[in-house]
Amino acid sequence: MLLRVRSITYLAEAINGYELVDPRGRDLPRFAAGAHIAVRHADSAVRDYSLWNDPAERRRYCIAVLRERDGQGSGHWHERVRVGDPVETSMPRNNFPLNDAAERYLLLAGGIGITPIMAMIAELRRRRAEFLLHYCTRSPEATAFRDDLDLLAAQGRVIFHHDGGDPARGLDITATLRDPRPGTHLYYCGPAGMMRAAAAASAGWPEETVHCEYFTGPAAQPPAPLDEDRPFRVRLAKSGGVYEIPAGETIIDVLRRHGIAVRTSCELGYCGSCLTAYCDGEPDHRDQILSETDRRRYLLICCSRSKTPILELDL
């Protein structure tokens, strides 16, 4: 997708927030708390960034970029990205989803690892779920979203831990995770040292209750180059209609605009609700779930495109 930078905000020392929107003001594909996108600006490297805004929002994706000492692409964002710039992104992907069945949630965030947790907090507040966040940073000045979290801190739902650069002076992760309360699910994200400590401390928890997101885990697939996201047409075999699918729009977007009812749920290529048979043409499958056998007969019209000029659907 080709999006535009609508605003850049200062979140904390060395951390900027970037608000990305559709250039035409259209809704963006839905995402769930914990999701991330792969992003590229101009000739910069493709990198994954968690979405930190409320998943209920449809008109923007918000990411945060920490300026790292070794650069690794973050310097490009801090020095060269400006409001109004186009950026290329993947569809949202989620390797860190919230479990709906938990009775309560224990959240641990370290530094920039707060970003997926912020989206989780928005969702948990909407559900009126019980949660507690331990947020570890070097200092108050290095604490992103401090103002947003102060009220929750006053309510006892967020605890800040500032270690001055010495983890030994911060949160005692071993003690915090020593006795898991039944029905509690743990979510943690942060720098390598914190991740190792949390993994070791939660080793005795039921496996299905522990969830984490690593910065250095397998990256999302890079977004397809813009010149490969070409327009194509879909022909509906049953109704006979033919519709142009422009670059940057999905089959579902176009069909809805023309009053054609389609069944959807996640619109991210994960749930399979929009599974549709095709009769002719070669789909460009961009989903996360279909087997090679399934792909010979079906596609997910929320995300897939076409390698041929015309794709005929069994609709």
Image (cartoon, rainbow, N blue to C red):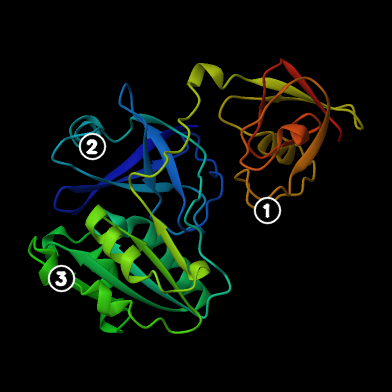
Decide: is 10 above or below 232.
below
Left or right: 41 in relation to 211 = left
Decide: is 246 above or below 7.
above
Q: Amino acid at mark 3?
A: Gly
Decide: is 159 above or below 231.
below
Pick the front one: 106 or 89: 106
Are discs 1 and 2 less than 8 Å apart at CB?
no
Residue 255 sits in quarter: top right
Name the spot of residue 254 as percent of width and height, x first: 69, 34
Residue 308 sits in quarter: top right
**Disc marking residue 25:** none
How much space separates mark 2 and mark 3, taking CA atoms? 26 Å
How much space separates mark 3 and mark 1, taking CA atoms? 41 Å
Helix, strand or loop at mark 1: loop
**Disc marking residue 74:** 2
**Where is the C terminus found, in terms of image quarters?**
top right
List the residue tagged with mark 1: 265
Name the spot of residue 171 as percent of width and height, x first: 20, 73
- Looking at the rendered structure, the number of numbered marks drawn on it comes to 3
Q: Amino acid at mark 2?
A: Ser
The crowd level at tag 3 (other Cα within 10 Å; few <14, some 14-19, many 20+) is some
At x 66%, y 40%, the residue is: 302
Left or right: 68 in relation to 174 = left
List the residue tagged with mark 3: 170
Q: Amino acid at mark 1?
A: Ser
Name the spot of residue 259 as percent of width and height, x first: 78, 41
Helix, strand or loop at mark 3: loop
Pick the front one: 230 or 281: 281
